[in-house]
Image (cartoon, grey):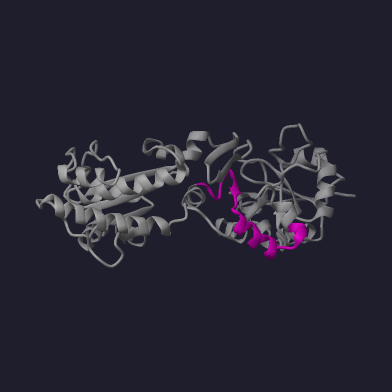
Amino acid sequence: METKIIKLDAENVDIAAIKEAAEVLDAGGLVGFPTETVYGIGCRARNDSLTRLDRVKGRSANKYYTLHIAEPTDALKYVPTMGLRAKKLIKNGWPGPLTIVFGLDGKDVEIQRNKLPGEVFAILYRDNSIGIRCPDNRIASMLLAEAKNAILAPSANIAGQAPAVEAKEVIERFSGQIEMVLDGGLCSHKISSTVVKLDNSGASILRQGVYSESEVLEKATVTILFVCTGNSCRSPMAEGLFKKYLAEKFGCTVDRLIEKGYNILSAGTLGIVGFPATSQAIRACADRGVDIAGHRSRGLRRYLIEQSDIIYVLAGMHRDSVLEISPEAADKCLLLAEDADITDPIGQPQEVYDVCAGLIDDAVTKRFDELVL
């Protein structure tokens, strides 16, 4: 076999060459192509192609292969239900040097089993999970978009050797064994992608790569913000109650929620800083098993709005305040009780606080149940 080599300019990609390479992949051939990390060898997710790829790489047949996709939204074809952390990590990490192994529940596994050809399903899903990568390289993205089959793409190297970071290394190792090499020049990172697994137990790094563990966890942290006026009663109660339910779901203490990837905050539109929650709010929460005695007020600021993934406001005027600071937050800023304000109990007797806490608890419970965590 003669390996065809096509040199490409990433700034002005020859679409005819990309189409030709995609046709090779769809016909069962193997194509070397660049990503921003290292070169990969692409093959369709079919057993005949995979057997060839294993033989060429000298790799055992039970190895896990990663699906490569052209753009982030393509992941929804393979992961029906996306949790908040997965969405956040995709938003911050794709396209880019990050491989995400998604853990699927039984329902989603059955959806995919019924949706995909049996051979393809068996290749892509192992142990109720699938590994997906969305490279940040124009040649790779165009090739993946053009291919009609699901494409697997392990690094272009013999098992146990360092991955190729330029086309000549791919050619030296695989000339005469693969159909084509797309020469896109030197890879920008020259190191493999970081691999992270996301499932109900949280995020865990399976392989160090371009991103460090701390960088990945930061990219995957979801921030939820509750907003009222003074941040001394309503929003602290909402924050505390939400933390309680989140901690119960994950089987951890409240102070470990950040380790699980959730940062739950509250703030007030008046901008008051450092004041404790009112004694009545503390008592109302204590009656529900929530301790907010250590709360200190925080003023609403642009950076808080921008870093938050969801903002729940206690009244319509608070939403107005949020949008006045950051109009771009409109889609993520929601009234906690959906269609009603929760009235400020400040200055009222304990009984009013208790009623308010009950309304907040009901609203938080409903919002909590809506979320895919």
Residue drawn at x 23%, y 53% as measured from the top left: 357
In this image, 357 relative to 217: left or right?
A: left
Instruction: Provide the residue span drawn in magenta.
Output: 93-120
In this image, 149 relative to 87: left or right?
A: right
- Asked whether residue 96 is drawn in magenta, I would say yes
- Whether residue 222 can be seen here: no
- Asked whether residue 109 is drawn in magenta, I would say yes
Residue 262 image position (x, y, % from top left):
41, 44
Residue 168 image position (x, y, % from top left):
76, 39
Residue drawn at x 15%, y 42% as measured from the top left: 279
Residue drawn at x 69%, y 52% as measured from the top left: 125
Residues 363 and 202: in front is: 363
Residue 42 image position (x, y, % from top left):
74, 50
Residues 308 and 226: in front is: 226
Residue 332 image position (x, y, % from top left):
36, 58
- Whether residue 225 can be seen here: yes
Rendering quarter of residue 210: top right
